[in-house]
Amino acid sequence: MEGIVVAASATIRGRGKRVLRRPWPAMAAVLVVSAFHSISAAAALSQHANLLIQPAIGTHHMTYNGGGHATARLLRHGGPGGTRAVEILVRRQPPDPWNIQYMVGVGPALRAGDQINLSFQFRSAARGKTVRLAAVLQYMRSPWTGIFSVSAATGFTWKTVHETITILKPIAPSNIAIAFNLGGQRQKLLLANIELTFQDHRRGNLNFHGPWLKPALARIAKYRMASLTVQVVNGQGHALADAKVHLEMLRHAFQFGTAVSSAMINSRSANGRKYRHTLLKYFNHVEVENGLKWGPWHDQRRRARTLRAVQWLAAHHLKIRGHNLIWPSWHWMPAFAVKLKTHPRQLRRAVEHHIFSEVRALRGKVDCWDVINEPLDNLSLQHLFGRSILTDCYQAAHRADPHAVLYVNEYEIAGAGGLHINKQNRYARLIHYLLAHGAELGGIGIESHYGSLLTPPRRLIRVLSRFARFGKPLTITELTIDVHNRQLQARYMRAFLIAAFSVPEVVGINQWGFWAGHDWISNTALWNGEWRLRPVGQAYIHLVYHTWWTNRTGQTNAHGAYHTRGFLGDYRLSVTAAGKTIHLRTRLEQGGRTVRVIVP
């Protein structure tokens, strides 16, 4: 239920600080703009578990009490990716910032220990201007005590704000709101994609051993394993009974990968040697952390170091993910490209030349590319050229290497509790646009960075299955689990791997680093800085190289056949009969395989 009310009341300021103020008279000259969204607990939680607000930009026209300080209007397609936004114009600066508010009510009751995850996006409506606001979680009645606040500023580029709050005492239904204090200066800003979610570990929302687990294990057995028959005969083609058969797995078909540092690949230090040894032992796919991005690639010295690392990786038969060709924000582009934004034709040629030349230079070494990285919130190129620039990027990459799988990559699709429904919808619309307009899109990347708000396995499966319906391979591209409880971290790694591995369309899970001594977030690494394996690393190795690893020994039956099942991948097969041993390699793929071994 949505409506517009004029709220003649003061709020609070300060992080968690109680500030007492009196309500203003109803006809005061000071304007408070309030868009109140009443969402009942039952309605919110039945449709999207743990979802309190999503997205909180309603259809309305603005009314106010005549003060003339501010006005607001709805822009149906004014937000990132064409989502709804509210445009707020602060004509005159009031005495206090909280005299002008955009307010969103929260319906469900909350309990002590609940963790609230707030996210929203905003930007200036005018180029060259900085806008400022404060988002406050507050009670909706006197004395309007504040629970939490965060201040932020940005320019013309969309800024995404994420904050996590722990509720310290119970809160009754419809008793709090998110209030955006906007009156700190004269300004014109856009506000979009307000979402509020919660995570309560005490209620068992993660449900590591819930009803999702048994079907997931059944799907793993169905889609990640296949039958293998070894038929052993002599030189005359007669079956050899009681031949000894040994099957040894060498490599998964599924991509269990990690981001790597070019510096560590090239390092001659003891840590460098340990880094490379560990990489080869526990991973079969890699993505270079930074060296293939446009800026580092444009730097000739950094490119040379990256190419040395790529050469080593290719020589050791590691498949490489190219990350990334275009991160479409001025912030992530090289300086020379940013200078061309006033010369659009030259910039467009520079973008396409960069993509074509880099992909062509690494053709045969890089098997897949993140062509566009995080396009939902990085919109500089789209604002300048429209979305057609994205399609052109895929066409340039495809011309350079028709065999490479070309991905789009985005964050917070399966992360943050899996509750960013609005962003999931935007991602789906973008993918549909790319496919409908001829982009050579070959895969869908799901980053999967996790903090305190972990996505329950059942919801993770649901999100992945939604994007699987596009008929393209899915890859978990940047898995990190940044929680400090080591046992929870390990348990979630196990649950995440099982859930993702059980979705047939998922072809790979890439972690963003593995050693704390050289990792983006050292807390998420499988090994600490002294190379001691953490519980999260134990969980990973136990599943990938024990539970999902096939080594078999047996004998052929009276018909000279040995039957077994194994996980898809590469194998060494040894057969011993009549005093002779035959060694060969084989690959087990979906649909199964029969290997005929002749013992002369």
Image (cartoon, rainbow, N blue to C red):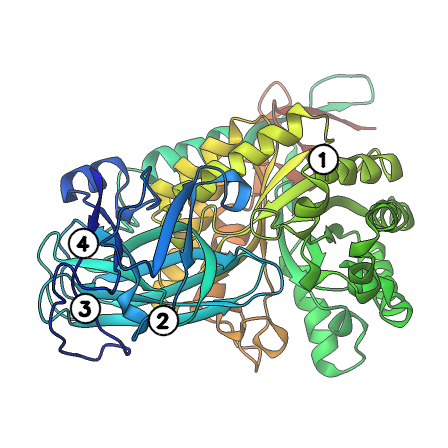
Q: Nearer the viewer, mark 1 or mark 3?
A: 3
Mark 1 and 3 residues: CB-CB less than 8 Å, in contact? no
Q: Which callout, 2 or 1, points at the residue further toward the start of the chain?
A: 2
Q: Which callout, 2 or 3, points at the residue further toward the start of the chain?
A: 3
Q: Nearer the viewer, mark 2 or mark 3?
A: 3
Badge 2: how crowded within 10 Å, few (<14), some, or many (20+)?
some
Q: Nearer the viewer, mark 2 or mark 4?
A: 2
Q: Gap in Å between the C-alphas at discs 1 and 4?
A: 46 Å
Tell me the amino acid under the disc marked 4.
Answer: Arg
Element carrying mark 1:
helix
Residue named by callout 2:
150
Q: Which callout, 1 or 3, points at the residue further toward the start of the chain?
A: 3
Residue 470 vertical position relative to residue 489 in the rendered view, above or below: above
Residue named by callout 4:
203
Residue 439's x, y, as percent?
A: 72, 31
Q: Gap in Å between the C-alphas at discs 3 and 4?
A: 35 Å
Quadrant of the image containing the N terminus: top left
Q: Is residue 555 visible?
A: no
- Residue at image x 78%, y 55%? 341
Mark 2 and 4 residues: CB-CB less than 8 Å, in contact? no
Tell me the amino acid under the disc marked 3.
Answer: Ala
Residue 107's x, y, as percent?
A: 17, 49
Residue 146's x, y, as percent?
A: 20, 72
Name the mark on residue 10. 3
Q: Is residue 132 visible?
A: yes
Residue named by callout 1:
388
Is residue 460 or residue 62 the one in the foreground?
Answer: 62
Is residue 481 or residue 99 the one in the foreground?
Answer: 99
Q: Gap in Å between the C-alphas at discs 2 and 3?
A: 18 Å
Badge 1: how crowded within 10 Å, few (<14), some, or many (20+)?
some
Badge 3: how crowded within 10 Å, few (<14), some, or many (20+)?
many
Q: Gap in Å between the C-alphas at discs 2 and 4?
A: 28 Å
